Image (cartoon, helix red, strand yellow):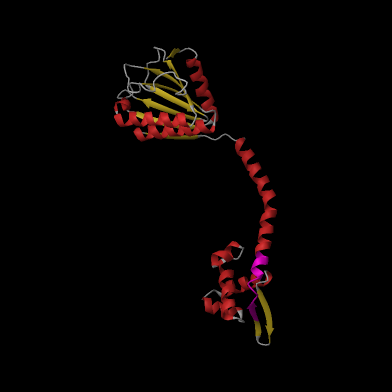
Amino acid sequence: MNTVLNQIGLTENEADIYLAFLKHKEQTAAAIARILHMDKSSCYRAVESLVTKGLLVTIPRKRGTTHSAASPEVLKELLSTRQLELKNQEQPLDLFIKKITKDAEGKRTTFIKVEKGIEAVRSSMDASLSAAVAAEKVIKERYRLDYPYFNDKEHVRWVNEFAKRRIQSGVSIQQIVDFAGRDVFAPIMKTDAKLLKEIRLMPKKMNDMQGVRIAGDTVCIISFDESKDYVVITIKDKFVAQLMESMFDFIWERSDLYR
């Protein structure tokens, strides 16, 4: 019952006190404080508030002041007042939201996360897909098929399932890859409008073991060392994404189409 009273604007103390007056009829504030085991000063403040709201009626007596609960029908009036107050706050709130949204758009935000492991690779791919869905509906990536985690059959299965989710989301993909004699992704490793995919061959001079994926404002980098240990770096920054996309497009235009 208190929850209903709280929703129309009563504090916890006010709700308890009003219900106590309904039950015990005419009482002094001190008596209600004793009944509820409540601090007297807190009780007095809440009683004054309830009187102001019209939920308690003050009754002067020779030996002090008592109060009595007003009809619960007053709660409907209180609810109507509360609704009107909330309605009047809608326009100022809309203006406030527009202002803070505009202020946020004008400020540069950067998020960087560094992780390791196959789950990090998968979560970075999911992050790219989400970013693409929210932006230009395209993922641009460069990678090598001799990455060691492509020896993991479970990961290969996951990547193929990811491709299905990407296509279902209507997100196209541009890939710059080397083939290194690998055919694990044969069903999806081709330029095909149905797959929403276009592949270009990585220039031979690009023989490093680093990969990059760009989608919207998100950049994911896979960086390998000499022992083929790797880290996954996720960067969310509009300007970094623009830089990496420009570099990708530069390589893309100088790479051969693969069908």
Residue 118 occupies quadrant = top left
- Give above or below for 65 relative to 226: below
- The reply, left or right, for residue 165 in relation to residue 229 is right
Residue 136 occupies quadrant = top right
Residue 64 occupies quadrant = bottom right
Residue 117 visible (yes or no): no
Q: Dividing the image into 4 quarters, which one contains the N terminus?
A: bottom right
- Give above or below for 70 relative to 150: below
Q: Position of residue 86 (x, y in %)?
A: 66, 56
Q: Position of residue 99 (x, y in %)?
A: 66, 42
The reply to whether the magenta stretch includes residue 65 is no
Q: How many marks?
A: 0
Q: Dividing the image into 4 quarters, which one contains the C terminus?
A: top left
Q: Position of residue 39 (x, y in %)?
A: 54, 74
Q: Which residues are magenta?
A: 66-78
- Give above or below for 208 relative to 149: above
Q: Position of residue 54 (x, y in %)?
A: 68, 71
**Going by the picture, which residue comes out furthest to the bottom?**
62
Picture residue at 68% right of the left edge, 70% below the top: 52
Picture residue at 44% right of the left edge, 35% below the top: 113
- The reply, left or right, for residue 181 in relation to residue 256 is left
Residue 209 visible (yes or no): yes
